[in-house]
Image (spheres, grey):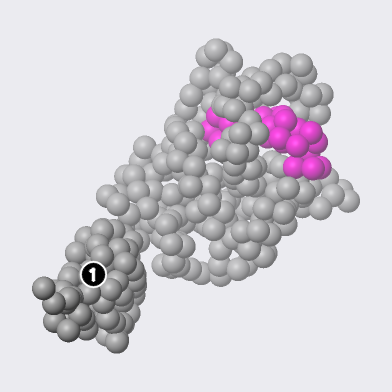
Amino acid sequence: MIHATTGEELASQDPDRPGAPASMTKMMLALLVMEAVKEGQLTMADPVQTSRLASKMGGSQVYLKEGESFSVEDMLAGLLIGSANDAATALAERLTGSVEATIQRMNDRAGSLKLSQTKFGSVHGLPPSPGQAGDVTTPRDMARLGMELLKYPDVLRWTGTPEAPFRGGSFILRNSNKLIGKFPGMDGLKTGHFAEAGYNVAVTAKRGNLRLVAVVMGAPTNQARFTEAARLLGEGFNRFTEVSVVKAGAPVGTEVRIARAKGPFRPLAANDVQILIKREEKDALKTSVEIQPNLAAPLAKGQVVGALIVRVGEREVARTPVVTAGEVARKAFWWLTPWK
């Protein structure tokens, strides 16, 4: 389990144990599609045509027919709500021109995200055919992937939906994440299962300002993965809280006097500071401002003059630069004033 914003690990058991992600593989495909939309390579309204290969996919599917076309948005719904393998194949072919090229892009992206224990052999997560390389990953890598996917909040429109119509309502997409609507704040992300992989799930939930991501892999039963995921998230929300310490631009500390300045000034925080702490540590939270030594006027507006340091007890947990709110002028000395 990790904090969705910082990636801080809050709980773990065998987080680097490798296993097959099964349909959690589709999280990486969804990330590539969302990035392509952001970069203008695709739009949600672009048509995605079904190839013969896509129409022949087994497992979970929306029963696409060869030549049939749906928008990127509809295919993403099929992918993330219905876990449709035919939609995954069609999107992969639309993204790069071929399934093989998309698998390569998925592995390249895993590398850039430093998912060092992850290797994709498919775009959908189905068991590999004889002689084919299978997908492999770890709970830690899947949590990091989930964190990256959450940079595109539109994804939660699909992953947080229990069911939705497809093909004009003639087919109903049903979300296999059984915590949706049952665990408060739950709105994603993806399940995965086949016999050798066990039962997997990557979940995310938000309560107040705090969003967490948890991953369970290799559970022995369908119910066990959801029970464990709910336990992890429940403990996380009970034990931790996110505190907004200061907003960017807010005055911090006390007035500062420096050499040759006309008068004192009060510095501003350069950035927002939010921290995740255990609830029982909240009363031990304290801040201090350290000003750089030997500062002298004049100073420019926005010049860094020190740091705001956040501590829990004696342990430093965050820091951000502090800056001048405006110019700090140099005072005029009498011997520099011209005689009248």
The quadrant of the picture occupied by the C terminus is bottom left
How many tags in the picture?
1
Foreground: 264 or 90? 264
Foreground: 307 or 197? 307
For disc 1, the neighbor class at 10 Å (few under 14, some 14 to 19, many from 20) is many
Side (left or right) of 297 relative to 59: left
Residue 166 included in the magenta stretch of the image: no
Q: Residue furthest right?
A: 131
Side (left or right) of 246 relative to 7: left
Q: Quadrant of residue 287?
A: bottom left
Foreground: 240 or 273? 273
User: What residue appears at the point 71 percent right and 16 percent down from the top-left corner?
Assistant: 68
Q: Please state the horizontal and vertical placement of residue 308, each as a whole percent of the image.
A: 28, 73
Amino acid type, residue under disc 1 in the picture: Val
Relative to 43, is 39 above or below? below
The quadrant of the picture occupied by the N terminus is bottom left
Q: Please state the horizontal and vertical placement of residue 328, each as a whole percent of the image.
A: 23, 69
Which residues lie in the magenta part?
Answer: 75-102
Q: Please state the horizontal and vertical placement of residue 5, each as a whole percent of the image.
A: 42, 57
The reply to whether residue 60 is visible in this rendering is: no
User: Which residue is disc 1 drawn over?
Assistant: 328
Residue 77 included in the magenta stretch of the image: yes
Q: Secondary structure at mark 1?
A: loop
